[in-house]
Amino acid sequence: MLYQIDRIRARGVETGYLRFGTGPQPLVILPGLSVRRVRESAAEVANQYRSLAADFTLYVLDRREDLPAEYSFAAMTRDVADALEALGLQEICLFGASQGGMIAMALTREQPGLVRRLAVGASAARMDAARSAVIEGWVRLARAQDAAGLFDAFAQALYPAAFYDTIWPMLPVVAAEATAEDLGRFCILAQATQAFDLLPRLPEIRCPFFSIDAADDAVLGADAGAEIAAAMRDAPLFERQTLSGFGHAAFDTAPDFKERLGAFFRAQRSGCGE
């Protein structure tokens, strides 16, 4: 799969992104919280989404390059919006995974004319004490510069035990590549999510909206998808599906996840506000 790694500057902020695919419709992907940048996993990501490359031109956006010491969720969303504007993208299909899904929902509510169709995977419309506790545990490890501990705790929370058992021997190798800067960046991005609460305003999203959640999500909880569905119960263009057996990172490990996304994004239904 051919792909391009580049950066865009908007309002003085530089954002890295991955681009691939040849389709006429832009599909923007906002990944979840990670120690690694998009450019470091570009080949893997392009391969994961290769089934969509004929119908879409895909843009996988990283978070901004130079993070301020204190970074709010509102600023994170604004930076993504500015990057998309600088790229000249309009009427996009938008998919966000986990934290990326939170950004995607906030962005769609704030700029309804930008997003034609919205999908989120294993995401939540708000943080609560239990969800925040998981993230704070990761932050403590990152602050202690315990990359090995962080990668292990991260993997155990994201994946079911059987999958974790297949990857744990590789975790120390990957963790050894993480720098002090990487861990500091992770802390800033993780903390930016802690005050997130879009739940009361979620029904303001009017475009076709697809939420795929995980029944055994050990990060955001099995109730995260149910909260989104309850808030959107009166929205005729909302659809929810729940996957079992894949954990929080179902968007990476469920073999038919990309097929589900493709079916939603290819569907000929009304766009936002129509």
Image (cartoon, helix red, strand yellow):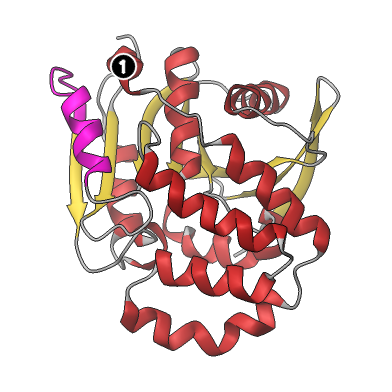
Q: Quadrant of residue 162?
A: bottom left
The amino acid sitting under disc 1 is Pro
Determine whether the residue tagged by mark 1 lies in a helix, strand or loop.
helix
Q: Residue at x 78, y 46 (%)?
A: 6
**The C terminus appears in which quarter of the rendering?**
top left
Q: Quadrant of residue 254?
A: bottom left
Residue in the foreground of this view, choosing between 253 and 90: 253
> Can you give x and y, in whole percent of width and height, for residue 263 in the image?
27, 46
Residue 160 image offset from top left, x and y in percent: 32, 73
Residue drawn at x 23%, y 51% as measured from the top left? 222
Q: What residue is drawn where x is 62% and y is 23%?
A: 81
In-image side of 78 versus 90 (left or right) = right
Query: Can residue 188 be seen?
Result: yes
Find residue 213 and report its horizontal and vertical position in percent: 27, 49
Question: x, y percentage for residue 179?
Answer: 81, 65
Instruction: Kindly tell me whether residue 55 is visible in this rendering.
Output: no
Q: Nearer the viewer, residue 196 or 99?
A: 196
Q: Is residue 2 left or right of residue 97?
A: right
Q: For mark 1, what is the residue?
A: 200
* Residue at far top of view: 273
Classify residue 188 by image quadrant: top right
State left or right for residue 236 relative to residue 185.
left
Whether residue 109 is situated above or below residue 130 in the rendered picture = above
Q: Is residue 231 magenta?
A: yes
**Vertically, is 166 above or below 160?**
below
Span of residues in magenta: 223-238
